[in-house]
Image (cartoon, rainbow, N blue to C red):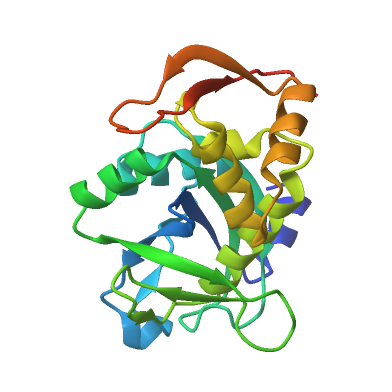
Amino acid sequence: MPATARDIRRHDQPALAVDLVIMTIEKGLILTLLQKREDAGKVGGTHGLPGSILHIDETLDQCAHRILRTKVGIDDAFFEQLRTFSALERDPRGRVVSVAYFALVPHEIFHRAVKSHHSLETGVVQYLGLDDEGPAAAIRTLKDVPIRMAFDHGRIIATTIQRLRGKLDYSGVGFELLPAQFTLRDLQDIHETLLAETLSKPAFRKKMRDRGLVRPTGKRERGKAFRPAELYERVRGGS
């Protein structure tokens, strides 16, 4: 046996997990998919993020894909690695290091996943900040009932919002929360909800057009009785 292998086995090995923040935005609310926990007394909360221990024969990205497919029922979505969470006592059951990812989906796909999996529930997120003291996010149900999150999953969700806020201005991440065709009102709502601030409508639309990020489809939204808005689509590669 190589000396390096013997050296590695002398050390205690923490478990390595992947946790997935699946997020959408609808009607000014940040929504995330939560897994109901049957072991709330052991993990410190009634709900947590969909996750899994990393299998020996898969990469981190493959594990995130597996969670998305098997626990949520979504075959494909924009996802990105967030960061590693390794606080010593983050899991009361033992030493577990978690690599967190976030996945962004339009709200139609999000609600379809909730309806098809009885173990999933919608969480409404209020971002509180990432100070060392106090909770990073308050999570509640759609019926406004507070949710007690397991582990450090509330902080993982808050970290996701912080990351998305930072990426809005230089990437097309906001488009991942929209269907292929959308109104500029829908796009502005994504930005305002994530940033928790009101943006100037004329300035926002000018910015999107001047940077070549959107183009009109020549179609208008359906089901609107009064002046249906024009539909746009994303231009990939815009500045």
Check the image and report above or below for 108 versus 180: below
Tell me, yes or no, if residue 57 can be seen here: no
User: In this view, which residue lies farthest toward the top?
Assistant: 218
Tell me, yes or no, if residue 218 can be seen here: yes
Residue 139 sits in quarter: bottom left
Q: How many marks?
A: 0
Check the image and report above or below for 204 versus 231: below
Between 100 and 191, which is closer to the camera in this rendering? 191
Q: Residue at x 30, y 33 (%)?
A: 225
Percent across and percent down for residue 218 are 49, 11
Q: Residue at x 69, y 60 (%)?
A: 162
Q: Is residue 114 left or right of residue 137?
A: left
Q: Residue at x 43, y 56 (%)?
A: 52
Q: Residue at x 42, y 20 (%)?
A: 220
Q: Is residue 223 left or right of residue 192?
A: left
Q: Is residue 132 left or right of residue 12?
A: right
Q: Is residue 144 left or right of residue 202?
A: left
